[in-house]
Amino acid sequence: MRYLLTWLSFGCLLFASCNGKQQQPTGRDTTASRPILCESTNYTGKVKIAIVIYDGVEVVDMNGPIDVFTKTNRIADHYYVYTVAAKDTLIYSEKCATALLPKYTIYNCPTPDIVVLPGCPPDVVSQLLSDSTFSQTILTWIKKLGTDTTKEIMSVCTGGILLGKTGLLDYRQATTHYLALQEMQQMYPKIKVIGGVRFVDDKNTISTAGITSGIDGALHIVEKYEGKTVADSVAHIMVYNRSCPMRDPSN
C-alpha cells in the first residue's frame, strides 16, 4: 500500500506539472515557468547548436542530432542545443504526427555556432523549394551564417537538397539520402555528390545521408570537438553502431 500511495502521489505531481506546461502562453519568456527537466538557458561559453524545424520535418532527422548533443552533455557539458523556426508558432512534423513548439525564432535566437537542417519527405522538399517565404527566411538565414567559415552547417538526409539551394555546397562534396542522390546532382551540377557514405565534411559544411545518418554527422562533430573516445562513448550510450556498413547507393 505504501508503494501504491507513493506512485499515486508521483502521478498527481506529474499531472500537475504537465497541466501547468500546457497552460503556458505561446509567446514565451524561455526562462519563465520552465519545466525542471529542461536544459539551462545559460549558454555562456558553450557551443550553440540550432536545430531548424519547419512544417513536414522528419522527426528522426531532427531528434537524432539532438539526442547526440544532449547525451554528450552528460559527459562534457559543452553544448547548448535548441530548436529554431521562422515563426513562434506550432510546427507539425511529417504527416502531422507531432506538434512542436520552437524554443526560438531565427530573429531572437542566440547566434549559433552550428546549424542542423533536417530533411523531409520528397513532396515537402518540392513545396519548400518553390516556397519564397521559406527561401527568404530559413534559407537566407542559413546562407548568411554559412558564409562565416567559423560556423558549421550540417544537413540531414534531404535537408541537403534544401541546403543546396543556398549555394553553400557549390564546388564542394556533399551527400543526401541514397534515393535522392541523382536528383541532387541534376538540380545542383556545381556540387560533387558522393554516395555510399554516411556523411561528407567539406570546409564548414557537413552533409549526411538518409535519416539515421544525422546521428553519424552529429557524432562526427562531437569527435572533432571532444575526441573519438567521447564520441564512441555517446554512440555506446545510444546503442548506435558507427561502423555499420552503408547501403550501396546503386541499389
Image (spheres, rainbow, N blue to C red):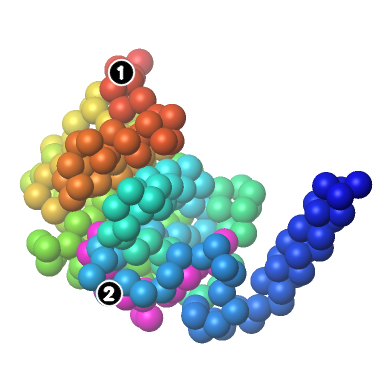
Residue drawn at point x = 32 percent, y = 36 percent: 233
Within the image, what quadrant is residue 5 found in? bottom right
Residue situated furthest front in the rendering: 2
Q: Nearer the viewer, residue 3 or 242?
A: 3
Q: Residues within 10 Å of mark 1 (few under 14, many from 20)?
A: few
Instruction: Measuring from the top left, give residue 228's x and y in whole percent.
Output: 20, 36
Magenta stretch: includes residue 75: no
Residue drawn at point x = 17 percent, y = 62 percent: 151
Q: Nearer the viewer, residue 75 or 173?
A: 75
Question: Label for residue 245?
Answer: 1
Q: Residues within 10 Å of mark 2 (few under 14, many from 20)?
A: few
Magenta stretch: includes residue 113: yes
Q: Are marks 2 and 1 in contact (CB under 8 Å)?
A: no
Q: Which residues are magenta?
A: 100-120
- N-terminal of the pair, mark 2 or mark 1, is 2
Three-letter amino acid code of the residue under disc 2:
Thr
Disc 2 is placed on an element classified as loop
Q: CA distance from mark 2 to mark 1?
A: 39 Å
Label 2, on which residue? 44
